Image (cartoon, helix red, strand yellow):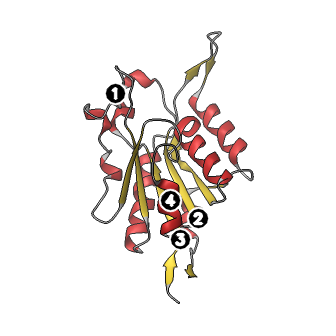
Amino acid sequence: MSSTLSTALLLIDVQKAFDDPGWGPRNNPQAEHNIARLLAHWREREMPVIHIRHFSVEANSTLRPERPGSAYKDEAMPIEGEKEMTKSVNSAFIGTELETYLHQQEITTLVIAGISTDHCVSTTTRMAGNLGFNNYLVSDACATFDRRASDGKLFLAEDIHQIHLASLDREFCSVRTSDDILQMRFELSDI
């Protein structure tokens, strides 16, 4: 019988395009700092890290693969041995090998962080929960942007962020801070 680390850090869309002012005001300016802390912790312990990048198919998107915005932010730059995948929709499970890879590596728990809370992070977390993975969503390692409804009403990024965290918690994941996660012990599982 061998042992494997069954908990992976899943970083979603930590890309330079989200620094573009066209996205509008954003909450949680410390998200990338907290992502970097989590990443350093995972690397120090040689635990699995998975990077997801969004490659948009929309003509004018700053996230198109040939545009500079598709690059990873410095705080989340992959290193050799870390798994990378690309997607073109909100869920990291659609059109990727993510689910297969997780099962092959016998990863049962995901610690999820990235951008944006209410789009790709939320969609991926919901799907991971529905697929039976044990999920932790890191509240201060995610961020989103102000949004306008179809009637023009403005919703502030922090409100959107908190509402999505509340909606996901105890249904699709356990919401925790980066400090909480860094204090947790993720054990080896015997296979």
Amino acid found under the numbered disc labelled 1: Thr
Front tag of 1 and 4: 4
Left or right: 151 in relation to 102: right
Contact, CB < 8 Å: mark 4 with mark 3?
Answer: no
Left or right: 101 in relation to 153: left
Front tag of 2 and 3: 3
Pick the quarter of the image with the C terminus: bottom right
Q: Secondary structure at mark 4?
A: helix
| Sooner in the amino-acid sequence: mark 4 or mark 3 | 4
Residue in view at x 59 percent, y 41 percent: 123
Q: Which residue is mark 4?
A: 100
Q: Which residue is mark 2?
A: 109
Q: Which residue is mark 1?
A: 62
| Image location (x, y in percent) of residue 34 | 46, 53
| Image location (x, y in percent) of residue 106 | 53, 70
The crowding category of the residue bearing disc 3, from other C-alpha atoms within 10 Å (few below 14, some 14 to 19, many at least 20), is some
* Inter-mark Cα distance, 4 to 3: 10 Å
Q: Quadrant of residue 177?
A: bottom right
Front tag of 1 and 3: 3
49 to 175, vertically: above or below: below
Residue in view at x 45 percent, y 53 percent: 97
Q: Which residue is mark 3?
A: 106
Amino acid found under the numbered disc labelled 4: Thr
Amino acid found under the numbered disc labelled 2: Thr
The image shows a total of numbered marks equal to 4
Depth check: 141 or 64 in front?
64
| Sooner in the amino-acid sequence: mark 1 or mark 4 | 1
